[in-house]
Amino acid sequence: MYRRTFVCGAMATCVALGSLSALASDEKADKAKAGPSGAWARKDGMQAIEFADKDVLKLFPHGKEAGIVVVCSYSVDKEGLIKAKITELQAKEEVKAKLKELVPVGYEFSFKWKVKDDAATLGDVKGENPEHLKAHLEGDYEKR
């Protein structure tokens, strides 16, 4: 009798632990599917980025206080590559005119975004003439 109770108890524990493991695995998968999130600031500069919504990315090339915001739609592929398209430029008119020359609405680019805990790296920016974006975006970020 005691043997049967022990075996049943051991089996119940294994089933419970297996369920917890599956739940933790499901949570990680859900986070990965949800994509990037939150506000981030570059460690060695004023630049900031914000994953504002599930498909809205805001770039602050000179920091949030500068009043320049590049709004993008984005998607994430299976390998974690982020593909973005500029949908709006927010700035004073004279600044917006210069922005339109460098990164006009409709401009498409991609980059790799790797997160570990409260640190992230943005790299491998690609697009047509991506040098300006690379200079403003590539680097190490910390969560804000």
Image (spheres, helix red, strand yellow):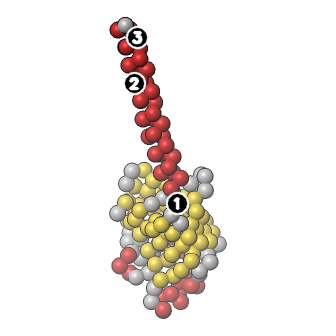
Local packing at callout 3 (Cα closer than 10 Å; few below 14, some 14-19, many 20+) is few
Percent position (x, y) of residue 84?
58, 68
Q: Residue drawn at (45%, 40%), measured in percent from left and top?
A: 23
3 and 2 marks in contact (CB < 8 Å) = no
Identify the mark at residue 4; answer none if there is no mark: 3
**Residue 5 location in percent, x, y?**
37, 13
Q: Secondary structure at mark 1?
A: strand
Q: What count of labels does the image hold?
A: 3
> Which numbered mark, 1 or 3, is in the foreground of this view?
3
Which dot marks residue 50? none
Q: What amino acid is labelled 2 in the image? A: Thr
Report the amino acid beneath label 3.
Answer: Arg
Rendered image: mark on residue 13: 2
Task: Work out how far the residue at label 3 is from the one at label 2, CA to CA, in angstroms.
Answer: 14 Å
Image quarter where the N terminus lies is top left
Mark 1 or 3 closer to N-term? 3
Residue drawn at (64%, 72%), measured in percent from left and top?
A: 128
Dot label at residue 123: 1
Between residues 71 and 4, which one lies in front from this camera angle? Answer: 4
Q: Nearer the viewer, mark 3 or mark 2?
A: 3
Residue 4's place in the image compared with 81, above or below, is above
Q: CA distance from mark 1 to mark 2?
A: 45 Å
Q: Is residue 130 visible?
A: no
Q: In percent of the image, x 53 and y 53: which residue is there? A: 33
Query: Is residue 109 toward the left or the right of residue 20 in the image?
Result: right
Drawn side of residue 30 relative to residue 85, left or right: left
Q: Which secondary structure, mark 2?
A: helix
